[in-house]
Amino acid sequence: MTRATAGRGEMDWEERYATYGRPFGEQPNAFVQRVMDEDAFSGVLGNGSRILCPGDGYGRHGIALAQRGHRVVGLDISPTATRDARDRALGASVEYTARTADLEREPYPLLAGEVFDVVVPVWFRLPHRGARVCWNREAVGHLRSRGWILLVTGRRVTSADEETGEWPGGITWKDHSTADEVRLLGQLLD
């Protein structure tokens, strides 16, 4: 079993991407699109922001953000998905870097001194709580002061309170959740 394959009860992401290609479609999540379209949020970010997309698979979110002029790093456990993301980014001529990485284990694939304006985990939820807490702490450690977290995940597996409880303190959260999705927009305080 490779690190990209699953243990008991866990998703085998490599098999899923190798078998189904792009199972979640081509368009980014509706909440991500809405937030990025908002004039107020776009004005805060400006053009060319550095964005981190953990669990980005084949680049569905990261490439869409890169097409808006942002510089994006996408991370995923599946080599098949990250290869697809690299090919798509090359074809779109955007600044998108796809890295294959298992975010349940250290060392994490972020470079020393690498800082992001926004972290965008969309439907990215590591199976073990301890790993989620460690990864969230690592991600925030690479987030600039007053940086943003745009988080979306399934309401069936978690709640807004559970999600915010797995991130370090010092983040203000706004809850935009629906009946189906936990949708949170957080900002790291100074």
Image: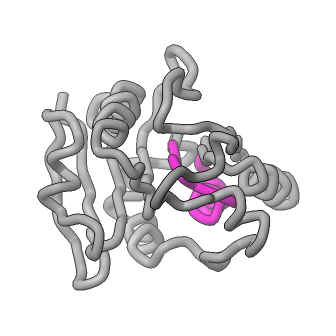
Q: Looking at the picture, how far across and down is residue 89, in whole percent?
A: 78, 54
Res 109 → quadrant: top right
Asked if residue 63 lies in the magenta stretch, the reply is yes
The residue closer to the viewer here, 63 or 79, is: 79
Res 95 → quadrant: top right
Compared across the picture, whether 159 is left or right of 114 comes to left
Res 154 → quadrant: bottom left
Residue at figure coordinates x 66%, y 76% from the top left: 23
Asked whether residue 145 appears in the rendered view, the answer is yes
In the depicted structure, whether residue 36 falls above or below residue 127: below
Q: Residue furthest front?
A: 8
Instruction: Please provide the residue range marked out in magenta.
Output: 52-71
Q: Quadrant of the C terminus?
A: top left
Q: Looking at the picture, how far across and down is residue 11, in whole percent?
A: 54, 61
Asked whether residue 72 appears in the rendered view, the answer is no
Compared across the picture, whether 104 is left or right of 186 comes to right
Q: Looking at the picture, how far across and down is residue 69, in whole percent?
A: 63, 52
Residue at figure coordinates x 14%, y 34% from the top left: 169
Q: Residue furthest top?
A: 112
